[in-house]
Every structure is written in C-alpha cells, then in structure tokens.
C-alpha cells in the first residue's frame, strides 16, 4: 500500500468504540450532547478481523487497538486473540485510559496482546479528575502496575502536556515512569478536541519539554526512527527512554506509515484528513476480499501529505471528528 509520496502503510490503528467512561478535556466533546455511534453501525469483531486480515496481507505488520476507551468494548480479549493469530502481524498493542486494566491485564496478555500504552496526564488526584472527568488516579496507577506485573511489554505512559493544565508536572511524570522502568511519551496537544479549548498557545512544544527536563535528567538525543512518531531521548547510563511526539511543532508526515480504521468502518489515511472512506458497503455487501483490498489500496494512494502541509490546521479548521471518534 503505497501513496503518491512513496510512503508505505505498515501500521494500523483500530478504534473499537467512540465511547469512553472518561471525558478528557482535550479529547471528548460535551458528553450530554454527543451522539454516540449506534450499536449496529459499529463494526463487529468479524468485520474488524476480516479488515485487519486483508490489510495485513497488503503489508500491515503492526496493529494498535484504541478508542474511545477500547476496554469498554465487551469481550475485547476475544478480538485480541483473533488479531494476534494473523500471520503477518508482528506487534499487537493497545492504548487505554487504564480504568479496566487491573481487572483485564492478565486476560489481555493471555489472549495475545503484546504491550499497552496507558494515558496518564497528572499525578495529582484532583487535577487528574479535572483533566479526565473521572476520579480515577489510584485505579489507573494500579492498572499500570498490574500491566507490568503480568508481563505486558512494553508498558508505556502517554501524557498530553498542555500549558496551564499540567506543564508543571513534566518532571514528576518522567520521574514516575523512569523510576519504574517504563517509557514515557509526551504528545503535543492537537486541534482534535471536542470542547474547542485548543489554541496554539496551549501547546507545550517538544523542545520546551526537553528544556524543562534537562534541569533534572541527563538526557541524550537518540533521534527518531523512520516511520515512528516519537523522537527518543535516553537517560544517560540509567537506561530507559523518553519520547516526544511533536505533530504540531515538528511534524513527521514525510515518513508516516500509519492508517486508521474507525469503529464505524471508515478508513482514514491521515489523522488530520477530512475524507473518510467507508469499508462497510463492501464488508456488509457481498464484496470480496479482492474488492476490499483494491478499495483500501486506492484510499492509501490518496493519503494527504499530512499536517505539516496543512498550515490552516494550526489556525483552526472544520475537523470532521473529535479524537474520541478517531482513536488518536
Ligand atoms: N481512551 C484511550 C486513552 O485515553 O488512552 C485511547 C484513546 S485516546 C483518543 C488515544 C490517545 O490520544 C491518548 O493517549 C490520549 O491522551 C491522546 N489524545 C486525546 N486527545 C488528544 C489531543 N487533542 N491531542 C493529543 N493527544 C490526544
Ligand atoms: Fe476517553 Fe481516551 Fe479521550 Fe480521555 S483521551 S476522553 S480516556 S478516549
């Protein structure tokens, strides 16, 4: 699956639901006004598995399950088991808010999940509640501990650093992860939030994060591997890694190898694209795997150049969906 810039799609993010038990202020729209995807519009596990199989035969070798909150999807471990059996898929990971992790980590691991990325934006209980809309910090921390205990590997922490909300906790968050041997990645705030609080001034750029951290840690740059979103930094001789995901200040579109499948069966070749291509007519009609493959290749060939080439995104644009309905 190659696009017009020669980029090859190798990684797939599958969003399994647009729903979430949290309401992070940089993601979820006002929950009292959201129109959730009706159940029948949501892809079934059979449809997700079939799409993933066809995509893997076209070159996808890594899958990340996301949402909304993926663990809200009933019996998700069954989907994990099915995806883990796809021959060409080398890595199967999940991004989660951690709420169900204490309860589910062992089952997920036994079902074939490799690693988990847990979102953690504050270590202060009150602030965590304000940011995520749920008094969940102790439970999320227990989930992280359990994920590491059962051997999910890697266990990573994702933090969205936002000026005026949690930028004073950058050192503490890194200390938390580093002292437990976990990787942490800071993601720049993207204008895909449902409440419309995003502004360029709210972004904590990667280079500012590094300046803050250099006062406390002996960091050395390791660069960014082709196709990866995070540029990595190592902690001197201590081992461990820090990642910076900088789509706004230093976009990595030129070697992006990702595509996304939403919970209602739309294929998205760029997080910032406004075009969604619906797989459902093929999946639910009598379309063959060959037709599905042809459709997908055509979508990928039209992949936009990326956010780095969309300056209007930074000034605000008519985004088609909020982050909870794309999957991050
Ligand atoms: N519910 C799960 C979670 O929070 O980890 C998975 C879905 S969430 C949409 C995926 C990732 O996107 C999370 O790490 C979240 O922090 C991040 N995210 C959400 N909204 C964002 C935004 N506007 N800018 C940058 N990252 C965002
Ligand atoms: Fe839910 Fe994740 Fe969005 Fe937070 S970031 S509202 S946990 S989907």
Image (spheres, rainbow, N blue to C red):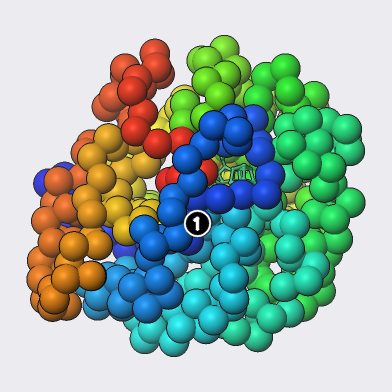
Side of 101 where 321 appears, left or right: left
- In the rendered view, tell whether residue 211 sits above or below residue 263: above
Look at 31% across and 77% down and name the residue there: 50
Look at 83% across and 64% down and name the residue there: 145
Q: Quadrant of residue 111?
A: bottom right
Q: Locate residue 319, reporting x and y percent.
A: 36, 28
Q: How many labels does the image show?
A: 1
Residue 115 seen by the camera: yes
Residue 181 seen by the camera: no
Q: What element carries label 1?
A: loop
Side of 299 where 264 appears, left or right: right
Specify whether tag 1 is near ligand 2 (CB below 8 Å).
no
Of the pair 273 and 203, the residue shown nearer to us: 273
Look at 60% across and 54% down and name the residue there: 69
Image quarter hosting the N terminus: bottom left
Look at 29% across and 37% down and name the residue there: 273
Side of 17 where 95 appears, left or right: right
Q: Locate residue 93, reporting x and y percent.
A: 55, 67
Q: Locate residue 115, reporting x and y percent.
A: 61, 69
Q: In which quarter of the image is residue 72?
A: bottom right
Residue at numbered disc 1: 17
User: Ligand 2 sits in which quadrant?
Assistant: top right
Q: Locate residue 288, reporting x and y percent.
A: 13, 78
User: How many C-alpha atoms fall within 10 Å of the one at disc 1: few (<14), some, or many (≥20)?
Assistant: many
- In the rendered view, tell whether residue 163 sits above or below residue 294: above
- In the rendered view, tell whether residue 254 sits above or below residue 318: below
- In the rendered view, tell whether residue 45 sits above or below residue 226: below
């Amino acid at each position: 699956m190659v696009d017009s810039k020669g980029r090859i799609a190798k990684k797939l993010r599958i969003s399994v639901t647009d729903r979430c038990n949290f309401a992070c202020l940089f993601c979820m729209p006002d929950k009292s006004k959201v129109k959730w995807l009706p159940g029948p519009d949501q892809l079934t596990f059979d449809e997700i598995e079939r799409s993933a199989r066809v995509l893997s035969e076209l070159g996808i070798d890594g899958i990340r399950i996301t949402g909304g909150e993926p663990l809200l999807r009933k019996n998700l471990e069954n989907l994990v088991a099915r995806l883990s059996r796809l021959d060409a898929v080398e890595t199967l990971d999940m991004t989660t808010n951690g709420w169900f992790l204490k309860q589910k980590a062992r089952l997920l691991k036994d079902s074939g999940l490799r690693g988990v990325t847990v979102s953690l934006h504050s270590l202060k209980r009150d602030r965590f509640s304000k940011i995520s809309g749920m008094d969940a910090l102790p439970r999320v921390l227990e989930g992280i501990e359990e994920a590491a205990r059962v051997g999910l590997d890697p266990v990573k922490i994702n933090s969205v650093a936002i000026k005026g909300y949690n930028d004073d906790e950058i050192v503490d968050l890194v200390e938390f992860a580093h002292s437990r041997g976990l990787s942490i990645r800071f993601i720049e705030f993207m204008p895909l939030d449902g409440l419309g609080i995003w502004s360029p001034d709210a972004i904590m750029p990667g280079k500012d994060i590094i300046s803050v951290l250099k006062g406390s840690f002996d960091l050395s740059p390791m660069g960014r591997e082709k196709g990866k979103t995070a540029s990595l930094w190592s902690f001197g001789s201590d081992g461990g890694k820090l990642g910076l995901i900088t789509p706004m200040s230093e976009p990595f579109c030129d070697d992006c190898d990702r595509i996304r499948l939403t919970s209602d069966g739309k294929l998205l070749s760029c997080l910032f694209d406004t075009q969604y291509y619906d797989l459902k007519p093929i999946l639910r009609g009598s379309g063959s795997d060959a037709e599905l493959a042809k459709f997908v290749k055509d979508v990928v060939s039209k992949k936009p150049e990326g956010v780095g080439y969309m300056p209007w995104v930074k000034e605000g644009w008519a985004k088609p969906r909020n982050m909870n309905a794309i999957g991050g």
